[in-house]
Amino acid sequence: MRDRFSIISSAGIIAVACTALVMTTSCKGKEKKQGGMPPAPVSAAAVERRDVPVQITIIGTVEPSSTVAVKAQVGGTLMKVHFIEGQDVRKGDLLFTIDPRPFEAALRQAEANLARSKAQYENARAEERRYAELVQKGYVSQTQYDQVRTNAESLDATVQADRALFENAKLNLAYCTIRSPLDGRTGSLDVHEGNIVKANADTPMVTINRIQPVNVGFSLPENSLAEIRRYMQSGALMVNAFASKDDPELIRGRLSFIDNTVDTATGTIKLKASFDNGDRKLWPGQFVNVVITLTVRKDATVVPTAAVQTGQQGLYVFVLKGDVAELRPVIAGTEHNGMTIIEKGVEPGEQVVTDGQVRIIPGGKVVLRYGNAEEEKTDGTVKAEETNKAGAGGKGAGLKAEEKGTAR
């Protein structure tokens, strides 16, 4: 009887242990189910069709449309400067006056020499005419007439030489007043009143730049040349410039120049765009952002640029299928104003994830979030914590069931 009671007691204990093990395993299964990954909070946007400009962006340098380095053509004392540094001048405005007195004296001397030569020539011509009549009548020999005619021709040459000297003296006197050769803006003065200036000195007296209109020069890789020339056949290419990052206003111009050769050292070609620059926002020597609009893509499929991700297999986006995120490889084109053209991979009307991609498991569930980023992050964290607490509660229930089974 004692042995039979021991066997029955052992069997009961084994049965209770098995029941407790089954209940513990069941509770752990519930805990695993309740403590799984929560849906990833994401933001999404619709795939759209838009007209997107095809553009090239480059850094350019502002250049004056014309520039003149003003130099003196005669030497002398600088008597007067008729403008202020940085002043706008018009074509023909008086800039400098060089002491004219030496040149006025030289002009009077040249004028006197010319008058003397003319008088001598007139007398020689009259004598030639008289000798021509005498030689016909036989009163003088032909040799005497030839001498008189030669003397008259020699004096004619002297008159021409003196006239040239007179014109040169007059020109030198005119060079004493220096006028602006174009409309533009003056730079800094390198000489001041009272200084002695030299003719054709190495350093200009002042430099004048024409800044209305103005040019912007830039260089592009040579492989862009064929594309630019192709689009230029349909009309002038529009070029926009940004004077600064803080000034969003566009300055509009047009492509006006393509260099006749490619720089073999850099593999680039020089281009220029012309701008009216009526408000003078562009200044010579300034760096600007240049945007060349080649064409406009009509009804292009676009997504926010933030939706396009880069992976080991290339570019991809997450497309929402209900509450599931599907990873979709795409072929992306150009980007403009935060939108990227998608050549292949998505269709208009589909929803793509624009934020929260790092939390997504391909094929996993997601939940759309709203409000600012901090609130969205907090909501997702709270939901995750609540889910974890639920899992912890399941685990506690399992422990209690295990304890209860053990007690039994």
Image (cartoon, helix red, strand yellow):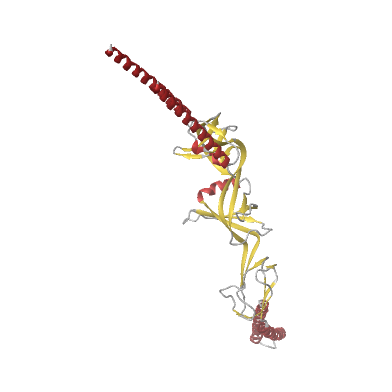
Q: Where is residue 18 shown, x and y percent of the image?
A: 36, 20
Figure quadrant of the C terminus: top left
Residue 176 in the image: above or below residue 402: below
Residue at point 57%, 73% (across, down): 203
Q: Residue furthest bottom?
A: 139
Residue 215 visible in the picture: yes
State the residue in front, 294 or 92.
294
Q: How many marks?
A: 0
Q: Quadrant of residue 2?
A: top left
User: Which sits in the foreground, 126 or 378?
Assistant: 378
The residue nearer to you, when weighing 123 against 101, is: 101
Q: Position of residue 231 (x, y in %)?
A: 59, 46
Residue placed most toward the observer, 110 or 316:
316
Q: Quadrant of residue 200?
A: bottom right
- With 31 as the anchor, is 343 left or right in this view? right
Residue located 56% across and 35% down the image: 352
What residue sits 48% from the left and 53% below the top? Answer: 267
- x%, y% of residue 325? 52, 32
Give the image location of residue 233, x and y in percent: 61, 46
Q: Quadrant of the N terminus?
A: top left
Specify the farthest residue to the left: 3
Q: Residue furthest front?
A: 2
Q: Could you tell me if residue 134 is visible in this image?
A: no
Work out whether 118 lies above or below 90: below
